[in-house]
Amino acid sequence: MSEDHVIGSVSKEKAGSVSGNHRLTAGSPDKEMDGLRRWFSDKLALGLGNDDLCEKPKVLSEMNIDGIVDYIKAGNCNANIITMAGAGISTSAGIPDFRSPTSGLYSKLQGFDLPSPEAIFQIDYFKKHPEPFFALAKELYPSSYRPTPCHYLLRLLHEKGLLLRHYTQNVDGLERVAGIPEEKIVEAHGTLHTSHCIDSKCAKEYNLEWMKRKITSEVVPRCEECNSIVKPDAVFFGESVPKRFSRLAEEDFPRCDLLIILGTSLVVQPFSSLVDRVPPKCPRLLINLEEAGNEQNPVMVVLGFSCGLQFHGADNFRDVAWLGSCDDGCLLLADKLGWKDELQSLIETELQRLKSQEVSAQAYVTVKD
């Protein structure tokens, strides 16, 4: 793999341009500002603002993916690797992401008179106009999508006792299909595996197969008890994130020894802010088509916080970006860790198992019909 994929250090010229911004550092001698920073750190659970950052620590042997590999091999992770994922880990399974201009889900909505593409995922709009969502839902409820090498690397991390938790923005459930235990998965934006009647007085639950039958028949799913709309348990704009997400994020991220971020643009809150909740010396690896999570919040910069990922600049000691497809990045990481054959064997075994299940399911449907 070309070294052009690795981002972790920059030339002296670029580093100088960063320092030229006169950003306050964590070692600022201003006691009042330091006190204010600490207060914000405590209130916002940023995991920043302590004495550990007064001097640049030596965390990684190299500021690239090899440094991450050395860090893992040295036994620094102590079963506390957290992974964060977005749509990019599922695109090779055939599931389109949301924002791609020609292949994303939003691009398929031109036939609807929507105030904005995102409106179909806004709860108030959905309650009045559920038709666009359920017309698009065929793309969200795949019949034969299979996990990708990324999903199986996550499974391997779990089997090796390294995975603390996997946080995902995806609602496709491919982590479950890949065999990652449910207790290890936090679905920040909910799931399509279950659905509920939107009438709070009824709230009848429906399973995945029931919802898939309704969608394939091209009707708006209605509750069998009260005739209200039945909505998947995916989180829409205007709804709160699951309580389990908030609770476990507060417990998990202070314990994190390594954060691996896969296939996400890190633009949706509160998911994107999780990168700032790991300890100050915790390495952070991004595997993505492009850099993400490195836009500075001006308010936080003034307060001396290095919020977000810091790939460029002389003061970077823990953030690495590998730019390319998630599958390629995960396969490379597995290869460098000496897990290549193990991962390939797992993928082949699991795909054969899924094929057998699909054949059995099809045979059952044929007999039933």
Image: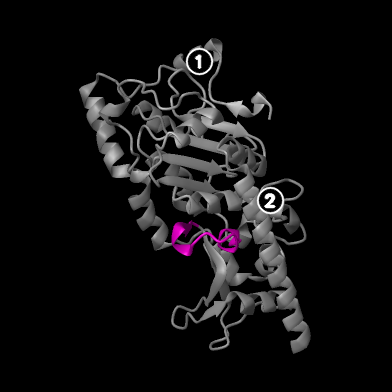
> What span is in magenta?
172-188
Q: Is residue 170 visible?
A: yes
Please give the residue where the numbered disc 1 appears in the rendered image: 15
Where is the N terminus found, in terms of image quarters? top right
Q: State the SS at label 2.
A: helix
Which tag is nearer the camera, tag 2 or tag 1?
A: 2
Where is the C terminus found, in terms of image quarters? bottom right
Residue 91: which disc? 2
Image-based side of 61 in relation to 337, left or right: left
Q: Is residue 294 visible?
A: no
Above or below residue 260? Residue 206 is below
Residue type at the position of mark 1: Ala
Above or below residue 220? Residue 278 is above
Residue 229: which disc? none
Residue 78: percent from left, percent from top: 38, 43
Residue type at the position of mark 2: Thr
Residue under the image location 33 percent in, 38 percent down: 47
Classify 10 Å Cα crowding around label 1: few (below 14), some (14-19), many (20 and above). Answer: some
Classify 10 Å Cα crowding around label 2: few (below 14), some (14-19), many (20 and above). Answer: some
Residue under the image location 57 percent in, 77 percent down: 207
Residue under the image location 58 percent in, 44 percent down: 264
Above or below residue 184? Residue 286 is above
Residue 159: percent from left, percent from top: 49, 54
Above or below residue 160? Residue 328 is above
